[in-house]
Image (cartoon, helix red, strand yellow):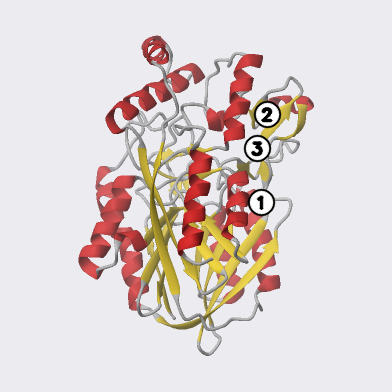
């Protein structure tokens, strides 16, 4: 087995708007550079590419351009390219027209060259392929990730209820605190790179400095510990997971991000002596999917249009109405949401899935059970900008919320203090409640086709 690593700086110009919140944040400085970090697997018959980008998401047009470049110049099949976004909230805005980016500053020349920068990381990795051995390490990292949705005393489920902690009953979903990493060494046993998978929203900073957040802090920490190696961070299913304990007033700072990275690094250090072995082959897979749009009636659409005419842009009512209108128009144009799942099986007991969207933790846990393999890595936010993918149960909880209490209109800066289930609002999720089942069906088909 040959493996190559590469990376390329993708930091936007200072002054670009940062993506992740509802209000505009113009960047004023760079805390740390953003990177496209690539690993290439080559067993002599198949080449598979994974690129992890310090971006909030990967839009379809950028992903498609990258794949076109790699096909035209390197003859790598588009199906064998997995482009993942770590989901940093202190990176650039990548497209126009969404609820979150209206009025934001986007440097068009940066977007034009970005696919070439990301493709450059792949070209470097291809050039650096060498014979390797692979080991797998696993651990649990407690105390740094929390399910951010909570059952409340009035029966509602609310996201980030920091303003009413006295009414919290319990978390509304699980946390997957599993850390898994692949250790790649050369034939002499020298460490060349790590592929790290952990599920946690990279939103520990909240300021206007460009930064990769905890994934970048982790890369820096691992390089200080193990030398000049390559680190690929794949963020797992964390649509409903963040770093904030609602009973702890301190919610964001650089120290928090570095503490998270430090804890993950120490667990990797404990398990770094996992025994590497020869891996003969990889088994790439690709399966196209069609998600249904969530239901929006003609009456709901017309009412939303009226709200957009009279409400302020930073109000929750405006955001929800904008989401409804967007879904209605998009559905009339496209009928369904075309996405795919791709990835590769490595040897007999390890598999990597690239899934679209911000996946709820419970879905990720179920996928790991369905895979039937000892080591399952899931990279959410891969290849597409799909929005949140909640569980069917979460959609039903949202419907119950609406029966208990009408959504209060508030001015928004982010998904805190909105007194409802943010991830299931039309502004955040455009998929229907059956999406979870469609994903499970696709995973079972992949498991069958790869002989897992």
| Residue in front for this viewpoint, 281 or 42 | 281
Neighbour tally class for label 1: few under 14, some 14-19, many 20 plus, Cα within 10 Å = many
Residue 390: x and y in percent read: 55, 37
Residue at the (56%, 63%) spot, across then down: 196
Q: Circle 3 sits on which residue?
A: 148
Residue at the (63%, 15%) spot, across then down: 403
Q: Circle 2 sits in a helix, a strand or a loop, which is it?
A: loop
Residue 268: x and y in percent read: 65, 68
| Count of number-bearing discs | 3
Neighbour tally class for label 3: few under 14, some 14-19, many 20 plus, Cα within 10 Å = many
Q: Circle 1 sits on which residue?
A: 176
Q: Is residue 183 left or right of residue 60?
A: right
| Residue in front for this viewpoint, 285 or 98 | 285
Give how far apart the Cα atoms at labels 3 and 1 are. Answer: 13 Å
Give how far apart the Cα atoms at labels 2 and 3 are. Answer: 8 Å
Residue 146: x and y in percent read: 68, 44
Q: Circle 2 sits on which residue?
A: 161
Residue at the (29%, 64%) spot, across then down: 77
């Amino acid at each position: 087995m040959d493996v190559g690593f590469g990376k390329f700086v993708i930091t936007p110009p200072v002054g670009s708007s940062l993506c992740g919140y509802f209000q505009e944040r113009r960047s004023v400085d760079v805390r740390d550079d953003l990177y496209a970090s690539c690993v290439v697997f080559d067993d002599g018959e198949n080449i598979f590419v994974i690129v992890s980008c310090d971006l909030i998401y990967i839009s379809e047009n950028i992903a498609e351009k990258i794949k076109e470049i790699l096909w035209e110049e390197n003859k790598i099949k588009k199906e064998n390219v997995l482009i993942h976004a770590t989901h940093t909230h202190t990176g650039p805005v990548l497209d126009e027209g969404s609820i979150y980016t209206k009025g934001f500053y986007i440097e068009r020349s940066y977007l034009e060259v970005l696919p070439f920068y990301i493709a450059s990381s792949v070209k470097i990795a291809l050039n650096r392929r060498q014979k390797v051995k692979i080991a797998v390490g696993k651990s649990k990292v407690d105390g740094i990730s929390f399910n951010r949705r909570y059952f409340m005393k009035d029966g509602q489920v609310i996201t980030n209820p920091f303003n009413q902690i006295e009414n919290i009953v319990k978390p509304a979903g699980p946390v997957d605190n599993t850390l898994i990493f692949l250790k790649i060494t050369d034939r002499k046993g020298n460490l060349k790179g790590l592929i790290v998978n952990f599920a946690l929203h990279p939103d520990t900073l909240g300021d206007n400095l460009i930064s990769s957040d905890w994934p970048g802090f982790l890369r820096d920490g691992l390089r200080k510990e193990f030398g000049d190696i390559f680190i690929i961070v794949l963020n797992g299913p964390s649509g409903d997971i963040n770093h904030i304990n609602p009973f702890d007033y301190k919610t964001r700072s650089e120290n928090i991000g570095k503490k998270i990275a430090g804890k993950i690094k120490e667990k990797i250090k404990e398990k770094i002596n996992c025994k590497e072995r020869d891996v003969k082959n990889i088994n790439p897979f690709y399966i196209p999917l069609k998600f249904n749009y969530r239901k929006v009636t003609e009456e709901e659409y017309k009412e939303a249009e009226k709200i957009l005419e009279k409400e302020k842009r930073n109000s929750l009512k405006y955001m929800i109405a904008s989401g409804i209108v967007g879904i209605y128009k998009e559905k009339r144009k496209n009928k369904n949401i075309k996405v795919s799942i791709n990835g590769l099986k490595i040897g007999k007991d390890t598999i990597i899935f690239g899934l679209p969207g911000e996946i709820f933790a419970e879905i990720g846990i179920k996928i790991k059970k369905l895979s039937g393999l000892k080591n399952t890595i899931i990279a959410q936010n891969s290849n597409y900008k799909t929005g949140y993918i909640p569980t069917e149960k979460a959609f039903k909880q949202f419907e119950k919320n609406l029966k208990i209490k009408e959504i209060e209109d508030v001015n928004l800066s982010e998904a805190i203090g909105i007194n409802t289930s943010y991830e299931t609002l039309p502004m955040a999720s455009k998929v229907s409640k059956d999406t979870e089942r469609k994903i499970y069906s696709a995973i079972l088909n992949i498991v069958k086709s790869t002989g897992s």
